[in-house]
Amino acid sequence: MALSSPGTDSDRTAGSAGPRPTRGLLPLLLAGNTAMYALYIGVPGVLLALQIEAIDPAEKVANFGLVSGISAIFATIFNPVAGALSDRSGRRNPWILAGGLLALPVMLLLGSVDTILLVTIAWCLGQAVMNVYQAALTSVVPDRVPTEARGKASAAVGLGLPVGSTIGALLGAAFSDDYRTGYLLFGAIVAAAAVLFTACAREERMPVKAPMPVKAQLAAFAGALKDHDFRWAFIGRALLILGYFAVAGFQLYILKDRTDLPAGLAPEEAVAILMPVNSVAMVVSTVLGGWLSDRYDRRKLFVGASAVLAAVALLIPAVSSSWTAMLAFSVVNGLGFGCYMAVDTALVTMVLPKAEDAARDMGVLNVANAGPQIVAPFVASVIVSLSGGGYTPLFVFAAVLSVLGALAVRPIQGVR
């Protein structure tokens, strides 16, 4: 999975009004994205971590980092490829349907393998089909939603993350003792969402879009980062995302190996409690942070403060291994990360180098979302391994990155 901004993958007509959206499109976007994030959280966050631990308990941290890192590289490469393929066809629905339906047999395969190598191969296939689904679904907003309605559409897409995360954590915990059934259920949810979306959201064939040559894409990337304000916004986002995912990916192992859970509470059940708590806090801070930053016209202040809040959250479990500390971490982390993502996205739109290249430059920003997710599992597993299996250095490392992310917005000059 790669965090992305709605409408940036292939929005080559940003700013145009576009066709009127299909009636009921926003609920369908919410359902489609909820299903996607449910799988992205429930599979790697719970089931995959447990499966890897069952295969080789002694090396679970290193193996999980390896599988997560390789699959993230695969996902990052495959997402733009899948987007380009749907661009070339001028259609989204067939790709959404194909990716969603293929999720079912791939999840069946993932649940049936029993070596780290086969798990890696199967999860890479899972990332491939899910990125076909994700790339096409993400492109629906710029294709079918008029400019004046894209705020509502983006909200529908964005709500898929906390809602899907909660569902994914709950289902992952419920099927923690039965990986195969759990994997099948997640695959079935995505397949059902794909069928529902393509059956109800009819589309007209779009004009075929020629892909941008690789050389031109590299030149565009370098050109965008030459802009002073955009470069610092890119750096700040990359630092915070790296810190966030370095810890988030290992949450189940942290609960298993470090946290003093109440009697009778299994680590998988603890995940199912923490994720909804985190999601509610994230929704509240996303809405409130966006509103307050608009009201006071202070983007840098809110971005910096929310990044610092994320750092404070990471220090809570660093100094205490109690269950209460993990609950507090989930709340504070959700408040900080939700506000950061909401306001920082608004800030970035104000420092884009050229208005006519807005879609392209927002795509460049997505590298700051996806790149750190690739690096995070490797970095985290190395830190934990070097510390002898301890997670305190990982929390401190992530907190330092969050503080650096807060400081990165200070040099930005074009936004208050």
Image (tube, helix red, strand yellow):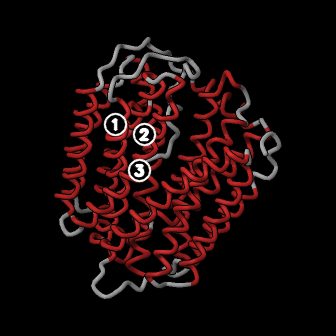
In the rendering, at what x and y percent does residue 278 appear?
45, 63
Q: Is residue 210 above or below residue 140?
A: above
**Furthest-bottom residue in this view:** 263
Q: Earlier in the sequence, mark 3 or mark 1?
A: 1
The quarter of the picture where residue 125 lies is top left
Name the amino acid type tagged 2.
Ala
The answer for how far apart the CA atoms under marks 2 and 3 are is 27 Å
- Secondary structure of residue under mark 2: helix
The quarter of the picture where residue 392 lies is bottom right
- Secondary structure of residue under mark 1: helix
The quarter of the picture where residue 265 lies is bottom left
In the rendering, at what x and y percent does residue 11 appear?
52, 25
The answer for how far apart the CA atoms under marks 3 and 1 are is 30 Å
Name the amino acid type tagged 3.
Ser
Say whether residue 264 is left or right of residue 58: left
Mark nearest the camera among 2 and 3 is 2
Q: Which mark is residue 71?
A: 3
In the picture of the structure, the residue carrying the numbered disc 1 is 27
Say whether residue 384 is left or right of residue 397: left
Q: Residue at x 32, y 41 (%)?
A: 31
In the rendering, at what x and y percent does residue 394 appear?
56, 72
Q: Residue at x 80, y 39 (%)?
A: 414
Q: Are marks 1 and 2 in contact (CB under 8 Å)?
A: yes
**Furthest-top residue in this view:** 207
The answer for how far apart the CA atoms under marks 1 and 2 are is 7 Å
Q: Label 2: how many residues lie within 10 Å, few (<14), some (14-19) or many (20+)?
A: many
Identify which residue, 399 or 299, lies in the foreground: 299
**Furthest-front residue in this view:** 295
Q: Residue at x 58, y 83 (%)?
A: 319
In the picture of the structure, the residue carrying the numbered disc 2 is 156
Q: Earlier in the sequence, mark 1 or mark 2?
A: 1
